[in-house]
Image (cartoon, rainbow, N blue to C red):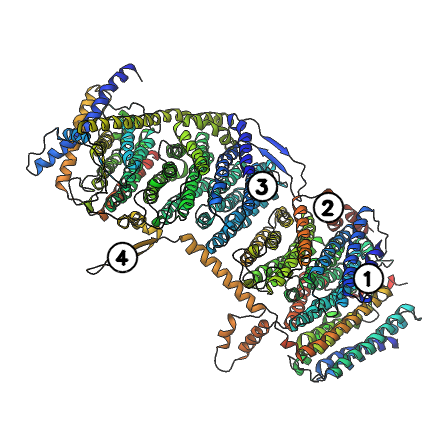
């Protein structure tokens, strides 16, 4: 890794850390526009985080250290994943052959600890949310891996930054249909993993219908801030995986690339906002169908790629 | 030397009849068997030679079986001291019959002449008859009648078979005796047709006595009703005698170049026996009858081994040895449980391990030995037979053998494990004889002795044991593939 | 116990030099006369790897057991337990060290037997007896029906029982024989390893065995099945692709079904047993990739697959051992392992909770623990398989990938359920009290936990150890490429360790930051954090009964996989204005047990009963329906009736008839089969003349 | 030569006695028939020896007298005594009717004669009938064993089988040494003696001799 890359990594990292809340407010703004409201100020998420951080937390007497560590481990896992996933520039800091597996399992680690932290309260609502979280997580994982298989086979690599970099741009001419399916699958995975409509509605206050929010019912103060931030970060990471797959940048545009990527992320946020405004939440027992659909899409893509490679 | 083997038991048996006091009778029984054992051990020290055309002589095969019998009898007599009850009608006759059985079996093992062998085998079964009727109950009587009649018919057929062999020797000039030595030497000149007929008749006859399926049906009754020590003698000793009878005839057939043909029949009967045992063990509720069927199974295994030749017959000898030891242990323990729980039924005997730990452990050991689990010897013998079958690439034998043995294992374990494990039932007495510990000690001691011996010989095989087994196996297989016969045949064919 | 510990240490020491460098095979023939075969021991890379596994786990169990057995006071003496454990150790070591078929089988059966006695240790309880029985029968059937014939075929071909002779002999077999051998091995060793559908003994035996024994069963005995399979593969030449795909499918089935059943269990130890099935599936997945690589001639692929399998063998031994010991601590403390009755143990036994969490994280294959390392290697081998297009042009490895991912997710769900319900929240059953965990047990668990962490955080130092073992497995391939392939195994590990280190550092950093922030916030408001009742949407006083139960937690997943599980739910939904006593239960009885084995055994038993009663009296199944035929019986029916009644009576005539019939059949058969038996009168004369001229 | 025809006649008579045994309905008569048959058989070795070599050797004489003493006098005496002491209901009670068993028996005889003269002996026997007759006798004995229910009749059946074997033994008169044959006879005697005792016990235990009722022991 060249000195230049190292130097450039610093501002990129800063941007990466600063970006997520903004995307949240982009989504909020979009939804506000659609419902004809003004919406909160652009920096509202940052204010919220600051407010939460300086609050003194309230703990249930049922909880243990697991309750406190859960959010931290989750955030740490996501931050580690961020060093492997190409976010703005199309290569990653610590990427190595086989890092896709690590990324997937880091997400899983985060989920595990969020769920455990939720169950630590012993409240039936959190238990409910945890159950749904693991259910949907389990079901979205095959779709994610199958999409990875497609990309890996297409680019003959197990390193995210190579699977989605300029290598993929060439593949789009060859295996476009497969990749389109993969993009679809990844979009569904994104919505499910970041608990967005149609899988989950972060805006609702009916605990019985919630997944992600209900798990955080008892978290307060800094823990809650960490959770909120981690959710946003997860959105950014999965979103950039989606974008790098859908719109691989040719290496020709050097520093334009990251800028462009930020715009695309904002656009993705808008898209999610639009989806949330247009569609209604699915019934919970319909959600597995959606995820199964994602799995089907990606498996068809796998078949296409394998047969295509045989031909 | 040879005379001693027969005269010692006879003498002590007469002593039993003569002595008025029960204790002394018992003493003479034990002493007699122990002296016999001593003579046997002595015979291993000294080199024994066989004179030709003598009625008696000790060849490796007979020597092995003789020693096994002697050992089993010694253990059983010690056991019986602990087992027997005071109010015993005609104890003297019983003891005399035990020693008579020993004498006739010794004669059988040493006999070099088919006729003499037949006589002593018949004598053995006649001596065994009163032993089975020991309990003087209706069931015992029925068992006795069935045993007596079936064995007599079988033995008559065996005699017919021996006569057929005699007919087969008629072309041999000058005429020869029916001594095994002569027969094997002259085998290539025997009339094959009559030899075959003789073999089949002898197989059925001795097979009835040995308890091969479908001729086995006297076994469960006799073993179920006879007092357990007697059952041990029958299943460990007398069956060996009948087996020896078959082996003698098989030797002749082998020498005459009919080994393949005879072996096939042996394998068929063996598989049939193991399969029958498998069918009848599963779900059986009388543990002595189950043991009887395992005896049928083990007879089958031995016969299969011999039928496979070469490696198989060594494994078969090994199996015969361990069968004797193992049957001793099983029936000794059966007798102990009979005294402990006063029932033959499996479901009445529970939780032996808690109830009487030593007995439980011994019984468990016996079970493992029966089912052919290492480090007991039957594991090796059955494995050896399996390998022998595979080496001859007789895949059907391999498949049926493993399958049926597996079923027997399942049946035995399913029936017997609950006897050992779990909580014992109420209202059973803690020791069979109240305060008389020495009885318990003698019974369990003799069982433990046999079990330890089986364990030792299973895990570790001293050189002389291996020699004995291999030599015995050699007498079964060597004439078959020795070049001498081929040469002789060629010489016959030339003029 | 000391003996066990010593043996464990010895095996580790013995294994040491072989793992560092692949030195030549060291073999020793002991002058111990067995009735059959030779007492020939040998030590190679593969053996060393399994010795290492045995050593580590057994040592910790040896430290753990005494304290545990003191707690669980049974009627059986502790001395017997110790002796049996030593015997089990000896037989385990014998199995991996044996270089002779007979010796191997001796060790194999001895291991089965000693483990049986250990499983049946608390045999006062009926369920213990049943579990032990199932264990014994299943294992013996596996051995007797499949392993023994396997070795019979091999030794029959080789003409010797030496392992060294088996390889060359196997080289001469034809294709179909090889497939038969492999299938026999798969069935036989698969039974021991607990591959579906031969797995039924694991969920039966593990819950009832004393916990240290369950740990050994699941950590070591099951691995002996894997060892046997690998040993078999070292002898066989590269097999047809079909075999690899078969193994892959079997392992996928056992993996997915295993974890699904685990999800449906209500007893911690039973659940862990099903997870053993799953992990064995993962190991077998690696092996199958290795086989595919071998049959397609890709040494690198083969090496990667086998290496992943071997690594997972050891890792599974570590974390499954840890989990079982921790579950044992729960049992030791509370006296139950029923998930629904437990809860909130993290407050009362925090150390044990931490141990269990480590194990759970590891078994879910989550970084930064050892489970992830091996699963990562297997993943990359599967990806490589897809790239190379082995196994139905890459479809098989792709299937493997997806199902492995599915297994990961389900395992996560499962252990979230266990840990969340057992250790978190409040105690669900007030009467269940928890004693503290004894120190020695803590030490033992700590050892295993540290092992998991070390392997997980420093994979770069761990992976090279597996090289010599792997090279044993791919020896049949061109050595140069093999050398290269072996070298290439641990290369990415160094890369892998970087981000894992980052993760650990980030966690530590965040914790520190969290401290500072809290201090700062407290300084700001001069109020420390408050502790109140769980809010849970403003219930005034949430009780323990209001917690989410394990069944409900798992039910959504179980329901969505009901096509595979066939669970039956008992849902008494609340009804009426004042609903009372409503509850939900989901049970998933084992399909293999219910649909395959019970009918099989039942049928056999019935058949035998019929044969028995028909041939020698007793209650005959056939007689009534013949007798029931009304009206005047015709001749045929009379004959039948007569036959049946004759057979039913134990009468002496029938038995004599058996003899006669047998005899007649034999003679007739001979007379027909052999032409020499009956001569024509023509030849009579010649014989007469011969006889006369012989007569003087 | 005439002795030849005498021998053949004797053999035929033996066979007829078998059939008579199958037909008779009285236990005592069964025993007596057996005794007569044994008498014929005891005479046979002498006849054969006379025909073979004009002089009488020790061997056949010993055999003849041993057999006669045992089978003609002692054993029938034992059996009849058992019959008398236990007031045994004197009917035979066959499982297969008399006529049926007669038919079966004669079928057996025919088959044996048809098959027997096709069998080649290595050395020409003194009489071609020996082989067939012995086979017929053995099989008839077995038939009695299987088809009769009285314990005593089964003993007689066993004795008939022994007689058949004895006839076969005559084929190799010069081979089997005297010792063995006497041993065989002795065994036979002891066997029957013990059988007699057991039969006596059976009667005392069950006060019947009907072996049909001896089926308490069976698989359950």
Residue B313 position in % (x across, y down)? 69, 50
Q: Nearer the viewer, residue D131 or C67?
A: C67
Mark 4 or 3: the one toward you: 4
Which residue is tagged 1? B10
Q: From the viewer's perspective, is residue D144 above or below residue C603?
A: below
Q: Is residue C572 left or right of residue C655?
A: left
Q: From the viewer's perspective, is residue D17 above or below residue C609?
A: below
> Label 4, label 3: how many angstroms apart (C-alpha)?
55 Å
Mark 1 or 4: the one toward you: 4
Residue B136 position in % (x across, y down)? 69, 71
Judged from the image, the secondary structure of the residue bearing numbered disc 2 is helix
| Residue C104 marker | 3
Residue B150 position in % (x across, y down)? 69, 69
Q: Nearer the viewer, residue A248 or C130?
A: C130
Do the residues bearing badges 4 and 3 touch, measured as CB atoms within 8 Å? Answer: no
| Residue B465 marker | 2
Which chain letter matches label 1? B
């Amino acid at each position: 890794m060249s000195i230049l890359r190292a130097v450039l990594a610093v501002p990129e990292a800063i941007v990466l850390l600063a970006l997520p809340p903004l995307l949240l407010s982009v989504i909020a703004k979009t939804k506000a526009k659609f419902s004809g409201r003004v919406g909160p100020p652009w920096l509202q998420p940052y204010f919220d985080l600051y407010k939460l951080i300086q609050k003194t937390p309230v703990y249930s007497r049922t909880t243990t250290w697991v309750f406190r560590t859960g959010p931290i481990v989750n955030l740490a896992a996501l931050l580690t994943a961020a060093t492997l996933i190409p976010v703005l520039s199309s290569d990653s800091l610590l990427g190595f052959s086989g890092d896709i597996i690590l990324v997937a399992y880091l997400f899983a680690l985060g989920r595990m600890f969020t769920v455990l932290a939720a169950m630590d309260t012993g409240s039936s609502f959190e238990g409910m949310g945890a159950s749904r979280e693991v259910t949907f997580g389990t079901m979205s994982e095959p779709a994610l891996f199958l999409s990875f298989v497609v990309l890996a086979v297409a680019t003959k690599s197990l390193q995210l930054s190579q699977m989605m970099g300029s290598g993929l741009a060439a593949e789009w001419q060859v295996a476009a249909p497969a990749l389109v399916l993969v993009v679809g699958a990844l979009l569904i995975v994104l919505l499910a993993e970041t608990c967005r409509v149609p899988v989950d509605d972060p805006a609702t206050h009916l605990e019985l219908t919630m997944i992600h929010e209900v798990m955080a019912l008892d978290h307060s103060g800094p823990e809650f801030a960490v959770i909120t931030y981690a959710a946003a970060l997860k959105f950014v990471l999965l979103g950039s995986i989606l974008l790098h797959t859908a719109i691989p940048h040719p290496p020709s545009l050097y520093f334009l690339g990251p800028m462009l990527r930020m715009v695309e992320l904002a656009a993705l946020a808008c898209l999610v906002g639009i989806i949330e405004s247009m569609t209604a939440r699915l019934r919970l027992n319909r959600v597995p169908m959606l995820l199964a659909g994602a799995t089907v899409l990606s498996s068809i893509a796998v078949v296409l790629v394998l047969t295509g490679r045989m031909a | 030397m040879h005379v001693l083997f027969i005269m010692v038991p006879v003498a002590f048996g007469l002593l039993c009849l003569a002595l008025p006091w029960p204790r002394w009778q018992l003493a003479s029984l034990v002493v007699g068997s122990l002296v016999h054992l001593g003579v046997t051990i002595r015979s291993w020290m000294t080199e024994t030679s066989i004179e030709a055309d003598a009625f008696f002589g000790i060849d490796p095969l007979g020597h092995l079986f003789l020693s096994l019998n002697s050992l089993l009898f010694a253990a059983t007599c010690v056991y019986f001291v602990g087992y027997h009850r005071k109010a015993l009608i005609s104890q003297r006759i019983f003891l005399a019959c035990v020693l008579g059985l020993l004498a006739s079996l010794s004669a059988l093992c040493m006999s070099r002449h088919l006729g003499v062998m037949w006589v002593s085998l018949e004598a053995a079964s006649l001596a065994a008859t009163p032993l089975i009727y020991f309990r003087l109950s209706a069931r015992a009587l029925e068992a006795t009648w069935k045993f007596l009649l079936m064995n007599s018919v079988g033995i008559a057929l065996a005699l017919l078979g021996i006569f057929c062999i005699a007919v087969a020797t008629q072309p041999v000039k000058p005429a020869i005796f029916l001594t095994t030595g002569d027969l094997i030497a002259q085998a290539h000149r025997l009339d094959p047709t009559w030899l075959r007929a003789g073999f089949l008749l002898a197989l059925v006859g001795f097979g009835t006595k040995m308890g091969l399926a479908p001729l086995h049906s006297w076994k469960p009754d006799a073993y179920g009703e006879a007092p357990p020590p007697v059952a041990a003698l029958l299943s460990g000793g007398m069956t060996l005698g009948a087996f020896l009878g078959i082996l003698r005839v098989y030797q002749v057939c082998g020498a005459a170049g009919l080994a393949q043909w005879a072996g096939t029949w042996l394998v068929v009967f063996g598989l049939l026996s193991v399969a029958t045992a498998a069918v009848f063990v599963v779900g059986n509720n009388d543990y002595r009858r189950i043991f009887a069927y395992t005896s049928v199974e083990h007879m089958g295994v031995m016969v299969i081994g011999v039928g496979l030749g070469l490696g198989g017959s060594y494994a078969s000898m090994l199996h015969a040895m361990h069968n004797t030891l193992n049957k001793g242990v099983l029936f000794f323990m059966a007798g102990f449980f009979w005294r402990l729980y006063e029932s033959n039924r499996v479901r009445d005997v529970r939780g032996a391990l808690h109830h009487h730990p030593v007995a439980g452990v011994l019984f468990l050991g016996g079970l493992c030995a029966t089912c052919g689990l290492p480090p007991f010897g039957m594991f090796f013998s059955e494995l050896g037979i399996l390998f022998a079958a595979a080496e001859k690439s007789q895949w059907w034998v391999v498949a049926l053998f493993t399958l049926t043995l597996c079923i027997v294992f399942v049946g035995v374990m399913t029936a017997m494990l609950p006897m050992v494990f779990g909580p014992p039932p109420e209202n059973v007495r803690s020791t069979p004889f109240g305060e008389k510990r020495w009885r318990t000690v003698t019974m369990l001691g003799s069982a433990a002795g046999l079990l330890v011996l089986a364990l030792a010989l299973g895990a570790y095989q001293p050189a002389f044991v291996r020699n004995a087994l291999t030599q015995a196996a050699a007498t079964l297989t060597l004439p078959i593939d020795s070049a001498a016969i081929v040469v002789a045949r060629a010489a016959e064919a030339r003029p | 116990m000391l003996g066990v510990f010593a043996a464990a240490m010895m095996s580790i020491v013995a294994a040491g030099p072989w793992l560092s460098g692949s030195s030549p095979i060291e073999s020793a023939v002991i002058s111990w006369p067995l009735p059959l075969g030779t007492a020939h021991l040998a030590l190679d890379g593969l053996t060393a790897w399994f010795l290492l596994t045995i050593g580590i786990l057994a040592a910790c169990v040896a430290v753990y057991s005494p304290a545990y057995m003191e707690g669980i006071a049974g009627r059986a003496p502790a001395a017997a337990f110790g002796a049996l454990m030593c015997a089990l150790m000896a037989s385990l070591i014998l199995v991996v060290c044996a270089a002779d078929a007979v010796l191997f089988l001796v060790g194999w059966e001895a291991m089965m037997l000693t483990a049986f006695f250990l499983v049946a240790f608390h045999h006062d309880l009926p369920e213990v007896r049943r579990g032990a029985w199932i264990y014994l029968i299943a294992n013996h059937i596996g051995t007797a029906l499949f392993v023994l014939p396997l070795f019979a075929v091999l030794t029959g071909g080789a003409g010797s029982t030496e392992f060294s002779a088996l390889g060359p002999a196997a080289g001469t077999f034809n294709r179909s024989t090889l497939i038969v051998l492999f299938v026999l091995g798969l069935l036989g060793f698969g039974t021991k390893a607990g591959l579906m559908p031969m797995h039924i003994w694991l969920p039966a035996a593990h819950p009832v065995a004393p916990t240290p024994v369950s740990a050994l069963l699941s950590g070591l005995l099951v691995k002996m099945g894997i060892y046997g399979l690998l040993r078999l593969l070292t002898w066989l030449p590269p097999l047809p692709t079909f075999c690899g795909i078969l193994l892959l499918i079997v392992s996928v089935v056992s993996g997915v079904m295993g974890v699904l059943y685990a999800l449906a269990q209500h007893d911690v130890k039973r659940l862990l047993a099903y997870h053993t099935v799953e992990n064995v599936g993962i190991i077998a997945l690696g092996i199958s990739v290795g086989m595919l690589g071998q049959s397609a001639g890709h040494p690198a692929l083969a090496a990667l697959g086998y290496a992943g399998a071997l690594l997972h063998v050891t890792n599974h031994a570590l974390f499954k051992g840890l989990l079982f010991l921790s579950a044992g601590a729960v049992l030791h403390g509370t006296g139950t392992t029923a998930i629904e009755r437990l809860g909130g143990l993290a407050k009362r036994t925090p150390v044990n909770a931490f141990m269990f969490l480590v194990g759970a994280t590891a078994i879910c294959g989550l970084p930064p623990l050892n489970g992830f390392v091996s699963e990562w290697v297997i993943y990359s081998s599967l990806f490589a398989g897809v790239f190379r297009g082995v196994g139905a042009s890459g479809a098989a490895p792709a299937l493997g990938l997806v199902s492995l991912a599915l297994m990961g997710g389900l395992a996560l769900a499962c252990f979230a359920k266990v840990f969340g319900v057992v250790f978190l929240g409040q105690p669900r059953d007030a009467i269940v009290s928890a004693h503290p965990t004894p120190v020695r047990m803590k030490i033992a668990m700590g050892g295993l936990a540290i092992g998991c962490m070390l392997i997980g955080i420093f994979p770069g130092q761990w992976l090279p150890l597996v090289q010599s073992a792997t090279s044993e497995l791919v020896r049949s391939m061109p050595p140069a490429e093999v050398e290269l392939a072996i070298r290439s195994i641990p290369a990415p590990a160094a890369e892998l360790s970087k981000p894992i280190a980052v993760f650990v550092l980030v966690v530590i950093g965040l914790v520190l930051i969290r401290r500072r922030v809290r201090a700062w916030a407290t300084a700001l408001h001069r109020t420390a954090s408050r502790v109140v009742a769980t809010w849970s949407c403003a219930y005034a006083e949430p009780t323990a009964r209001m917690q989410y139960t394990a069944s409900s937690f798992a039910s959504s997943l179980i329901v969505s996989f009901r096509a595979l599980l066939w669970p039956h739910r008992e849902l008494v939904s609340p009804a009426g204005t004042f609903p009372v006593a409503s509850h939900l239960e989901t049970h998933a009885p084992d399909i293999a047990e219910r649909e395959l084995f019970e009918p099989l055994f039942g049928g056999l038993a019935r058949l035998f009963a019929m044969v028995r009663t028909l041939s020698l009296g007793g209650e005959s199944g056939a007689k009534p329906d013949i007798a029931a035929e009304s009206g005047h019986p015709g001749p045929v029916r009379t004959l039948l009736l007569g036959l049946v009644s004759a057979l039913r009576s134990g009468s002496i005539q029938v038995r004599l008839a058996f003899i006669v019939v047998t005899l007649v059949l034999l003679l007739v058969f001979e007379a027909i089969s052999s032409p020499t038996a009956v001569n024509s009168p023509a030849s009579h004369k010649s014989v007469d003349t011969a006889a006369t001229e012989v007569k003087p | 030569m005439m002795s030849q025809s005498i021998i053949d006649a004797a053999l035929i008579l033996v066979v007829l006695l078998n059939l008579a045994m199958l037909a008779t309905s009285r236990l005592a008569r069964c025993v007596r028939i057996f005794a007569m048959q044994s008498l014929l058989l005891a005479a046979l070795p002498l006849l054969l020896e006379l025909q073979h070599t004009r002089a009488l050797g020790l061997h056949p004489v010993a055999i003849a007298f041993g057999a006669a003493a045992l089978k003609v006098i002692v054993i029938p005496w034992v059996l009849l005594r058992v019959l008398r002491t236990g007031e045994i209901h004197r009917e035979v009670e066959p499982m297969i009717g008399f006529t049926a068993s007669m038919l079966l028996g004669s079928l057996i005889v025919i088959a044996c004669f048809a098959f027997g003269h096709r069998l080649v002996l290595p050395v020409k026997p003194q009489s071609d009938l020996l082989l067939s007759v012995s086979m017929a006798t053995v099989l008839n004995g077995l038939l009695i064993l299987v088809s009769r229910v009285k314990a005593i009749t089964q003993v007689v059946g066993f004795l008939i089988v022994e007689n058949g074997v004895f006839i076969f033994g005559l084929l190799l008169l010069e081979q089997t040494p005297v010792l063995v044959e006497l041993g065989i006879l002795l065994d036979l005697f002891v066997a029957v003696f013990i059988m007699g005792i057991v039969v006596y016990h059976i009667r005392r235990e069950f006060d019947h001799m009907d072996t049909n009722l001896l089926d308490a022991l069976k698989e359950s």
